[in-house]
Image (cartoon, coloured by chain):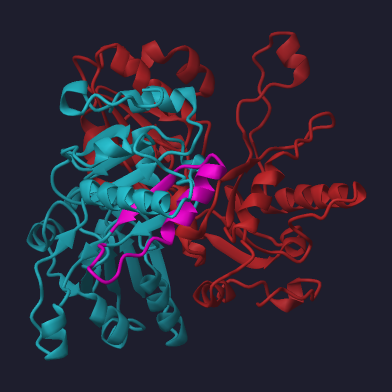
Chain colours: A red, B cyan
Amino acid sequence: MLYLIGLGLGDAKDITVKGLEVVRRCSRVYLEAYTSVLTVGKEVLEEFYGRKLILADREEVEQEADNILKDADISDVAFLVVGDPFGATTHSDLILRATKLGISYRVIHNASIMNAVGCCGLQLYKFGETVSIVFWTDTWRPESFFDKVKKNRQNGLHTLCLLDIKVKEQSLENLIKGRKIYEPPRYMSVNQAAQQLLEIVQNQRTRGEEPAVTEETLCVGLARVGAEDQKIAAGTLQQMCTVDLGGPLHSLVITGGSVHPLEMEMLSLFSIPEASSESRSIDGL
Amino acid sequence: MLYLIGLGLGDAKDITVKGLEVVRRCSRVYLEAYTSVLTVGKEVLEEFYGRKLILADREEVEQEADNILKDADISDVAFLVVGDPFGATTHSDLILRATKLGISYRVIHNASIMNAVGCCGLQLYKFGETVSIVFWTDTWRPESFFDKVKKNRQNGLHTLCLLDIKVKEQSLENLIKGRKIYEPPRYMSVNQAAQQLLEIVQNQRTRGEEPAVTEETLCVGLARVGAEDQKIAAGTLQQMCTVDLGGPLHSLVITGGSVHPLEMEMLSLFSIPEASSESRSIDGL
């Protein structure tokens, strides 16, 4: 049996009781290490689970899935995913491959940012399509996701923006030279995401378009959701450029045009104090 | 401290290790019993947690929240919610009330249908606004949610339909006479939801409108997600009227117009066998 087990969002103890029981009895336990991270490292997980974990990077899951699935028809193999196993496409892929090999699978769900984002007080059912914001480079500065934000706002829906994670990336030089030397991991902060968004807003204005989002749009920055030291900040997009939320992972929500009074009341628990902002006016807060 | 603790979706062991530790040390433990249910009852939870649970129905949470929060400033109180604590509005309310009383709170997240629905293979980020389908009565047959389905489909987004739960409802007669006699709980099935949807489709045709959904629209029915005996069925809306998914809770997904090949491949794992259907053609399956 292949078990896909969500680890939740915070630390080692966010695994479910059921998940932990399975981990402790599986013959091999893989830890998916490229779509998200917990606030604790592999060693802490190993100690708490009482099991050795095999790190599975993107390359391995995509190209060497057969290694992961080896003997899973006659023994139990666990594949651990931060959050819930159905956050990232590649895990569907693993299931399909298992099924083709006649290997049964089971999923043990957990919280992911897709539902835990509700902790900021915005209603989950009022979220539209989720977007991803990637690190821009000198030559690649995609803006197309902004159309989805626009559509969501036109329909009064909030947008969850998942922020880029670069783990085990190679520099162009090392890639070309085939050297398996990897850059240190990078996690996009709410500040960086907001700055890229404001640049898109400026670009749209330059082109004479009316941007769907402005400096004053109400946003919510979230950091380390589910962890002891989680931070949430509600304020304008402009404020998101400078608010200090600490270490990764970060997520950003761009609110829909209409925010329900109850949502607004919850957001006010997290509003950025005037002193730390440039005392801009926030719609409604 | 007030702890809001998600129980996940299946049975007693779907609580997180962290959640279980908190439950075991709190002075009072409430179980929210009206927005969702697990596949096991209160007694099973009590035995596994080793704690007495106080059932909190809607009335109590909305009207007697102060009882729940009593002494939570000097001791620890847990409020357990099936799924994740941020599925239903009323729990924001409890947090706001706690905050006004100077009581700190913490959330221990878990899976909810809002993210676990990904187990059917449809990508979570391709879901639009979530809708609720309520039991129709002779005099109240709301269709307005259908506009949201339409908008989602126009944008190529899937729609998660949460199906109605009637717990501790009074008959009109008992309500008028002030008798606290309650009807047996009712949980809407995928069959019932699909039948109501098809009636709306017919009504729209009668009015000369072009319905956004037809008998042939690809849908996914899900039952008891996260439980050992979970069932998923992919097929046409027509097939959803008769497919047998067993006991509650059920959810229904209406796919967006465009389904990615990888999504389609996952859905095919759950396609309804020809024999049990009326051999209708399903777009793409």
Judge by depth and name the residue closer to the eye, B173 or A218. Answer: B173
Position of residue A134 measured from the top left corner of the image (x, y, whole percent):
68, 38
- The quarter of the image holding the C terminus of chain B is top left
Q: Position of residue B43 (x, y in %)?
A: 7, 62
Position above or below: A112 against B167 = above
In percent of the image, x 58 and y 58: which residue is there?
A: A158
**In front: A180, or B240?**
B240
Q: Quadrant of residue B70?
A: bottom left
| Residue sticking out furthest to the top | A177
Left or right: residue A152 compared with residue A64? right
Query: What's the magenta region?
Result: B135-163
Residue sitting at the far bottom: B177
Any part of residue A206 in sight:
yes
Q: Tell whether position B157 is magenta.
A: yes
Q: Nearer the viewer, residue A135 or A209?
A: A209
Spot occupied by residue B172 in the image (x, y as percentages of width and height): 16, 81
Q: Nearer the viewer, residue A263 or A275?
A: A263
Which residue does the image show at 41% across and 25% down from the upper left?
Answer: B264
For the question of whether residue A50 can be seen, the reply is: no
Relative vertical location of residue A227 with respect to residue A71 in this rendering, above or below: below
Q: How many marks?
A: 0
Quarter of image, res B166: bottom left
Name the residue rendered at 65%, 25% in the picture. Answer: A169
Query: From the image, which quarter does the N terminus of chain B lie in?
Result: bottom left
Q: Is residue B160 magenta?
A: yes
Q: Position of residue B170 (x, y in %)?
A: 15, 78
Residue beneath the point at 73% across and 77% down: A274
Q: B166 above or below A144? A: below
- Relative horizontal placement of residue A160, taking residue B245 as reference (left or right): right
Res B41 quadrant in image: bottom left
